[in-house]
Image (cartoon, rainbow, N blue to C red):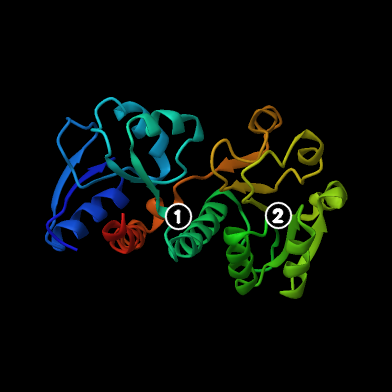
């Protein structure tokens, strides 16, 4: 892939490395916070701030602009259709979501260690949600010798977790179980940890929520009751930006010629 002109938006390290990789491939790269109306083969929005950058630049992108990002907001679909934007979610490209899940899981463990006072080894950990990220996170916690449990609404997911050797907790039984855990990881992009559940957790427990905005935790309740809850977004870009940039480059290379 060469001789393309990319607009790389955002200044986080993942975007910086992505710009460098594209240049090394023989492409022209412009880095900016705002689009100046030039013509680009593709605009690359930051993964953790796609919505903000899209909203700020809608009027400046030319019709039919190819735009890469993550979690494009559905409420802007009509506007995007009006200008015939071609939007590619990085996570929709084959193999990219799996690589991102690995990086996000490792980042979540780093955040837990920074926020807590216990080793992962020997700790009691709960992973809420056994999807792509949750299953990878559970396996990494288990490899670190944590006593790992999985909670999910989906019975089939719980059966899958059980077959993989994890203790399982149904949502209906979670109030009776939550007091045991040292670390609670949420991967579900919906409000899961509400007041009834938060009342049950140990006062020294750490919650690491890596679900996309607005997360899965009642943060107002946590603030009022001094619960150590942390909404941790953009972890691949924060802790392993070069790997994250390589993953995005892979997505662009796989998809741009077919669009």
Q: Which mark is residue 24?
A: none
> Could you say where residue 126 lies in the image, as x and y percent from the top left?
71, 57
Instruction: Locate the N terminus and report the quarter of the image it occupies.
Output: bottom left
User: For mark 2, what is the residue?
Assistant: 182
> Could you say where residue 136 lies in the image, as x and y percent from the top left?
58, 66
In this view, the residue in front, 191 or 69, is: 69
Instruction: Locate the C terminus and report the quarter of the image it occupies.
Output: bottom left
User: For mark 1, what is the residue?
Assistant: 91
In this view, the residue in front, 235 or 154, is: 154
231 vs 175, left or right, is left
The residue under the point 45% across, 55% down is: 91
213 vs 125, left or right, is left
N-term-proximal mark, 1 vs 2:
1
The residue under the point 59% across, 63% down is: 137
For the residue labelled by badge 1, is the local secondary structure a helix, a strand or a loop? Answer: helix
**What distance separates the C-alpha of mark 1 from that of mark 2?**
31 Å
> Could you say where residue 53 lies in the image, as x and y percent from the top left?
34, 33
């Amino acid at each position: 892939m060469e001789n393309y002109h990319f607009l790389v938006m955002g200044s986080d390290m993942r975007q910086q490395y992505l710009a460098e990789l594209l240049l090394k491939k023989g492409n022209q790269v412009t880095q900016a916070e705002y689009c100046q109306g030039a013509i680009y083969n593709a605009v690359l929005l930051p993964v953790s701030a796609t919505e903000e950058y899209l909203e700020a630049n809608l009027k400046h992108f030319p019709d039919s602009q190819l735009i890469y990002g993550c979690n494009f907001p559905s409420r802007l679909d009509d506007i995007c259709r009006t200008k015939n934007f071609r939007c590619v979610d990085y996570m929709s490209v084959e193999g990219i979501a799996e690589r991102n899940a690995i990086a996000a899981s490792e980042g979540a463990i780093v955040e837990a260690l920074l926020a807590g006072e216990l080793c992962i080894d020997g700790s009691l950990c709960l992973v809420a949600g056994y999807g792509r990220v949750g299953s990878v996170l559970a396996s990494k916690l288990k490899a670190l010798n944590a006593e790992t449990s999985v909670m999910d609404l989906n019975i089939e997911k719980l059966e899958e977790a059980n077959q993989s050797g994890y203790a399982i907790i149904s949502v209906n039984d979670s109030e009776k179980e939550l007091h045991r855990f040292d670390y609670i990881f949420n991967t579900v992009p919906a409000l899961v940890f509400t007041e009834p559940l938060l009342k049950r957790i140990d006062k020294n427990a750490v919650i690491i929520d890596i679900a996309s905005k607005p997360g899965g935790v009642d943060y107002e309740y946590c603030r009022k009751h001094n619960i150590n809850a942390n909404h941790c977004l953009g972890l691949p870009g924060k802790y392993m930006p070069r790997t994250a940039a390589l993953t995005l480059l892979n997505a662009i290379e796989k998809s741009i010629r077919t669009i």
